[in-house]
Image (cartoon, helix red, strand yellow):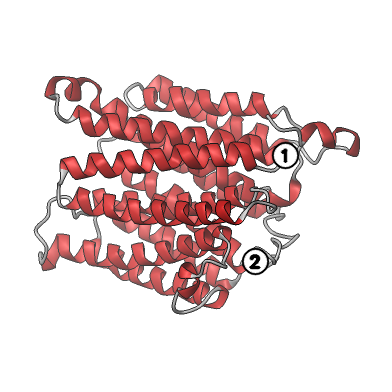
Amino acid sequence: MRIDHPINREFFVNPRLRFFILGLMVIAFMFGFTDQIWDKNFERLHIFLFNLCAGGFIICYHTENQPSPSPRCYLFLMLSLAYAVFAFLNMFPAAALISFSLGVVVESIRIRAFSFLPRELFDLKVSVVDKFHHASVLCLSLSLFIATFVLLNDTSLHWLPYKNLTLNVFFLGYSFPVSLITMSVMFSFIRRDISEQLRYIKQSFFWTVNLGVIIFFLFIVFELAIAKFLIATILFITVLMIFSFFLLLGVKQQQKHFLLSGMTFLVFTGITGIFYIELANFPELYYRYGRLLLDSHSYLSLYGWGLSGLLILIRWNDFPLKLNSWAVITFHWLVVGIFAPLGKNNLGIGVASLIAFCLFLHFFFAESKVTKFAEDEAQESP
């Protein structure tokens, strides 16, 4: 799918498909609190169902740009669900086999939409919208192939002895494809009539984000604390620059409200990430607040920033919507920024945040298109 080929008018209009994917997100959200009832590693299901199953399916379907998902997309969805279950049950040989198969499926979709060799990522004439999109699909397939090795290395091969090279650490990498596709969505709402210099700045954003996250992950594996803090700071500064860029040059449409909110989530993700790295130097404070800070970081990233892009993709052909954007956004912040992190250690708050999350999705999807009379108001800039 290229920037000069608009998203198909039938994309995600099937209400049953929408309901199923949103249901996956709700179930994933629920599993974030389930370990308070049953002491199992439900965090793995929490991450897999949202990032890989729901997010990965949306990325693949969006990449095909067809009215309905192809058999390949549905195969990805079924295999990813099986992968999540096998990984949760610690059935790692089966999970490794499925992980490799999923990588092959994603690559078949990527090659059909883009090319076998990702040469266009290095072409300055290619829009960053397409680059972030291509990078998202490529990152999804590569993470699945690497996860195959991580699973085998952690259970049988033991070729690399690094304690952070485990599935419990690596599965967080599945959030990166979702983040990249959200970047692609966001940059598609940047004005086209900008100077050549600003276009080069957009290109620099693409490489800083991608290389920065890859390097950051390597620093996590090799446990380089100072280097990790430095690259996290560089990424945070880049996010602030992208936020300013979008605030000034984003088109005046209703989607900009939700994307600005998403970028604000990402800014706070950077702040919590840096604080979490630094908190490790203070054992007493880390013991008291480390888990809460990490949970806040996770929810702001997954259900704040990442979800903002995915929801706009799902309702792409519905905008502008007849809803109070800022009321829905405020409610989104209350659910993700306050209730959900606190609910990780309090089952009552966890249940309340799950109900609130369902209400947020209801508010976002209940309303249809605005009338022509209200369209101009819905597209006003913040």
Residue 173 point in image, percent of width and height = 34, 52
The residue located at (68%, 47%) in the rendering is 315
234 in relation to 362, above or below: below
In front of the other: label 2 or label 1? 1
Mark 2 surroundings within 10 Å by alpha-carbon count, few (fewer than 14), some (14 through 19), many (20 or more): many
Q: How far across and how far down the image is residue 42, in percent?
A: 32, 42
Residue nearest the observer in this picture, 275 or 50: 275
The residue positioned 36% from the left and 60% from the top of the image is 83
Kindly identify the amino acid type of the residue bearing the numbered disc 2: Asn
Say which residue label 2 marks. 65
Q: Position of residue 69 (x, y in %)?
A: 62, 66
Q: Picture quarter containing residue 98?
A: bottom left
- What label sits on residue 92 in the rendered view? none
For the point 16% across and 60% down, which residue is it? 154
Residue 172 or residue 255, whichever sits in front: 255
Give whichever of 38, 265 is nearer the camera.
265
Q: Is residue 44 in view from this perspective?
A: yes
SS of the residue under disc 2: loop
Where the N terminus falls, by quadrant?
Answer: bottom right
Number of marks in the rendered image: 2
Identity of the amino acid at label 1? Lys
Using the image, determine if residue 370 lies above or below residue 138. above
Q: Quadrant of residue 94?
A: bottom left
Residue located beneath label 1 in the image: 252
* Residue 303 seen in render: no
